[in-house]
Image: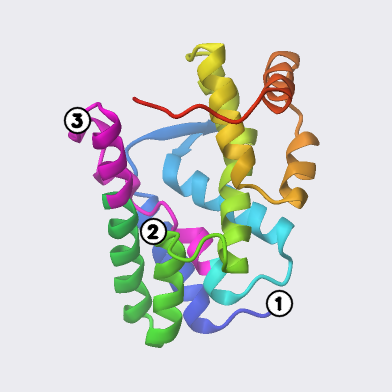
Amino acid sequence: MRNSAAYNLAITKFDAENALDPNTEIVDGSPRPRELVYAERLTAWVQKLAPEASEPLRLAARCQHICRWKIPRDSYPLTRAGYLRWRSDLKEFHAQTSGRILRDVGYDEATIQKVQDLNRKKNFPNDPDSRHLEDALCLVFLEFQFVLLAGRMEEDKMINAVQKTWKKMTPAAHTAALALPLNARELALVRRALASGPPASSTS
């Protein structure tokens, strides 16, 4: 798939912003900016799930969590209400940031609005692009974040998290998730989650 000059420039600018993340993640033995790594992983999953992905979807994948470190979780109350407000404010921040960059590189307003709608998860699950993006978000979590989280959280909470994640995914994403190289403990947690009932509501 041949990319437009505007697309390539937008990706370069998204990556430049995410490269400023002071938080790092070790990848192949070397520290890299965490949000840049996240954007690359999300892009890879979108491309794997939807090889003919639309340009707005590919753009949204690259900027879905752009500059996320600028609004830390601990800047909000550590309550359910605080968490939900943080998530809502993040979506709007990402959408505004992506919109500014897309305008700078010359995108039309219709494309910008579509990317921002994806950033905000505005039309999920009715929009097919939003479903692909959500699948990719869930698979990045299961592949790269699940193991670390499982080492810090109680099993019941992890099972609840897996159930909620699974509920948002399509059958194709379920198949991809079950093929991930999880270790025995995490795979057992997934199987327990799938064998259990519906997820309980969270209060924290």
Mark 1 lies on residue: 1
Viewer-side label of 1, 3 = 3
The image shows residue 16 at horizontal and vertical percentages of 39, 58
Q: Earlier in the sequence, mark 1 or mark 2?
A: 1
For the N terminus, give its image quadrant.
bottom right
Give amino acid for label 2.
Ala
At 75% from the left edge and 15% from the top edge, which residue is drawn?
Answer: 184
Query: Magenta region's main secondary structure?
Result: helix
Question: Would residue 107 be visible to someone looking at this image?
Answer: no
Tell me the crowding category of disc 2: few under 14, some 14 to 19, or many 20 or more residues within 10 angstroms, Cα based.
Answer: few
At 58% from the left edge and 27% from the top edge, which residue is drawn?
Answer: 146
Asked if the magenta segment contains residue 83, the reply would be yes
Residue 77 got which mark?
3
Q: Separation of disc 1 and disc 2 at Cα?
A: 23 Å
For the C terminus, give its image quadrant.
top left
Q: Which residues are magenta?
A: 59-88
As displayed, is residue 115 above or below residue 90?
A: below
| Proximity of marks 1 and 3: CB atoms separated by less than 8 Å | no
Q: Earlier in the sequence, mark 1 or mark 3?
A: 1
Quarter of the image holding residue 161?
top right
Secondary structure of the residue carrying numbered label 3: loop
The image shows residue 49 at horizontal and vertical percentages of 72, 57
Residue 16 got which mark?
2
Quarter of the image holding residue 15?
bottom left
Q: Separation of disc 1 and disc 3 at Cα?
A: 45 Å
Q: Separation of disc 2 and disc 3 at Cα?
A: 31 Å
Tell me the crowding category of disc 1: few under 14, some 14 to 19, or many 20 or more residues within 10 angstroms, Cα based.
Answer: few
Question: Would residue 72 be visible to someone looking at this image?
Answer: yes
Give amino acid for label 3.
Pro
Viewer-side label of 2, 3 = 3
